[in-house]
Amino acid sequence: QVQLVESGGGLVQAGGSLRLSCAASGGTFSSNDMGWFRQAPGKEREFVAAINWSGSITPYADSVKGRFTISRDNAKNTVYLQMSSLRPDDTAVYYCAARYRTIRIRTIPSDYNYWGQGTQVTVSS
């Protein structure tokens, strides 16, 4: 069983930056593909970014491409989401997710088996 704990959320002004962290325990972190998703009030959970087990593949949602960077440290069992040039429409609860590695990295929430509790990111205009 994999447990995921996100941290690093908060309130930031538009144009600012935040770095989210997701610490994993249980299972073998280096065997898992990891993803970040977000959910705004009244909206469905949506894909933000993912990273494969080795860190060599990192797809992004078009809305965050060029502004967000996903990375992982397998020695620390942690995945990160560096967010820059934040906009009010980035406001959401951000969730970390994990699944056992596959040949094709997944970007759909239902493809992930394990989820964190989420961390709130609020961007003020």
Image (tube, rainbow, N blue to C red):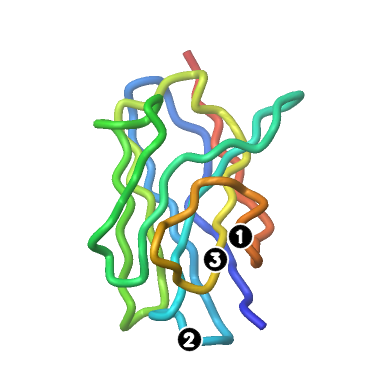
Circle 2: residue type: Thr
How far apart are the alpha carbons under marks 1 and 3? 6 Å
Query: Label 3 is placed on what type of residue?
Result: Ala
Q: Position of residue 77 (x, y in %)?
A: 41, 78
Q: Is residue 49 above or below residue 52?
A: above
Query: Residue 33 vs residue 119: left or right?
Result: left
Q: Are marks 1 and 3 in contact (CB under 8 Å)?
A: yes
Q: Nearer the viewer, residue 8 or 95?
A: 95
The N terminus lies in quadrant? bottom right
**For the view shown, which residue lies furthest in the front direction?**
103
Q: Which label belongs to residue 28?
A: 2
Q: Nearer the viewer, residue 39 or 17?
A: 39
The residue sitting at 31% across, 26% down in the picture is 85
> Observer-nearest residue: 20 or 67?
67
Residue closer to the observer: 109 or 8: 109
Label 3 residue SS: strand
The image quadrant of residue 43 is: top right
According to the image, label 1 marks what residue? 112
Q: Amino acid at mark 1?
A: Tyr
What is the CA distance from the residue labelled 2 to the residue labelled 1? 15 Å
Of the numbered discs 1 and 3, the one sitting upstream in the chain is 3
